[in-house]
Image: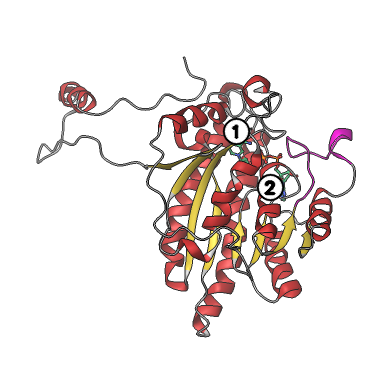
Amino acid sequence: MPHQHATRAADRARRDHPGDRPARERPAGHRPAEGRVVVVTGAGRGLGRAHALAFARAGARVVVNDLGVALDGGRAGAADRGGSPAGQVAAEIRAAGGEAAVSTDDVATGRGAERLVRTALDRFGRLDTLVNNAGFLRDRMLVNLGEDDWDAVVRVHLKGHFLPMRHAAAHWRAEAKAGRSPRARIVNTTSGAGLLGAVGQGNYAAAKAGVAALTLVAAAEFGRYGVQVNAVAPAARTRMTERAFAADMAAPADGAFDAMAPENVSPLVVYLGSDGCDGVTGRVFEVAGGRIAVMDGWRPAARTDRGGCWEAAALDRPVRELLAASPPPEPVYGAG
Ligand SMILES: NC(=O)c1ccc[n+]([C@@H]2O[C@H](COP(=O)([O-])OP(=O)(O)OC[C@H]3O[C@@H](n4cnc5c(N)ncnc54)[C@H](O)[C@@H]3O)[C@@H](O)[C@H]2O)c1
């Protein structure tokens, strides 16, 4: 089942402490992305659309990218037609008085990713923020998962993050070398499925786990060029989730806070894509409704050291002791 994490992320977020008020809270009316040029991939629908509109409201000029594919990455069907989704969102931004450019490039190709970055530079003369968000699903149990479905999903998410980052970073490295000190930002999109695993989503979970690791590597490598890199694991009502989790995703009828609206994810993305988040890099945030959690990555929970090579036959006891001394893992979404 797709996006089991969507509801569990919301549940987990509800248990979290509300946290301290931000030390550097800005006055209401401050436009955090003023003057920035922001590329959002997969921005024709769902979360990407909400991010693009939020960045425009926050003062950014936005490159709205979307290939306009169906939910499984295939050609758009009747329900998905009706003009270019990227063009429609760009038109919405312009109608509200903002500036937008359209990209219909496939972000998972070298040529598409290069043109995406070039669109920002040619149209607006600069690039400040890259939001990697585009993607699709092809859910199957592993035993039934076809090679094509593996390749397509890993390609769109993992390569679709790597290639735009690579081309954007090449630009920022050149800027840094020319002494122009970028304050650049990359916001990647991972998923609870990638952080904890999800039954029926082996391809997607592996790709999104890769996105989390890639975020850490990019943050470590690009820091010297003035580029901060973070990732969000969202939960929201989009075409990816609205049917599979209709009850959990439904908007409240009584006008109460609509926790699963994609617009709730965008403020964190705008913050991480703006210069106010100085020093925040290499982190993964889960975000749903009004809740934000910092996700803590792999780290040793218990250790032992024999001071020499173990024998397989002698390992059962120490391994069980290590497991007993470690917190139980979070369950895989959809397991049990
Ligand atoms: N909705 C959720 O609860 C949720 C949870 C966790 C992660 N995510 C992730 O958030 C991101 C956005 O998902 P969404 O729910 O808004 O889905 P969506 O289907 O509404 O939007 C994804 C958009 O990406 C576009 N796209 C697909 N392949 C592309 C390509 N190669 N190049 C350019 N554009 C392409 C599609 O045309 C589509 O408009 C995805 O990476 C998804 O995996 C979503």
Quadrant of res 219: bottom left
| Distance (Cα) linking label 1 and label 2 | 14 Å
Image coordinates of residue 73 in percent, x first then y, are 74, 39
Residue beneath disc 2: 50
Magenta segment's dominant SS is loop
Pointer 1 residue: 259
Q: Would you place residue 175 above or below residue 307 in this image? A: below
Could you tell me how many numbered marks the image carries?
A: 2
Mark 1 vs mark 2: which is more N-terminal?
Answer: 2
Q: Is residue 263 above or below residue 331?
A: below
Please tell me whether mark 2 sits on a helix, a strand or a loop. Answer: helix
Q: Is residue 328 above or below residue 64?
A: above
The magenta stretch is 66-81
Please say whether residue 80 is one of the residues in the magenta stretch. Answer: yes
Query: Which residue occupies 61% across, 53% down?
Result: 132
Identify which amino acid the numbered label 1 is placed on: Ala
Residue for point 68% across, 24% down: 254
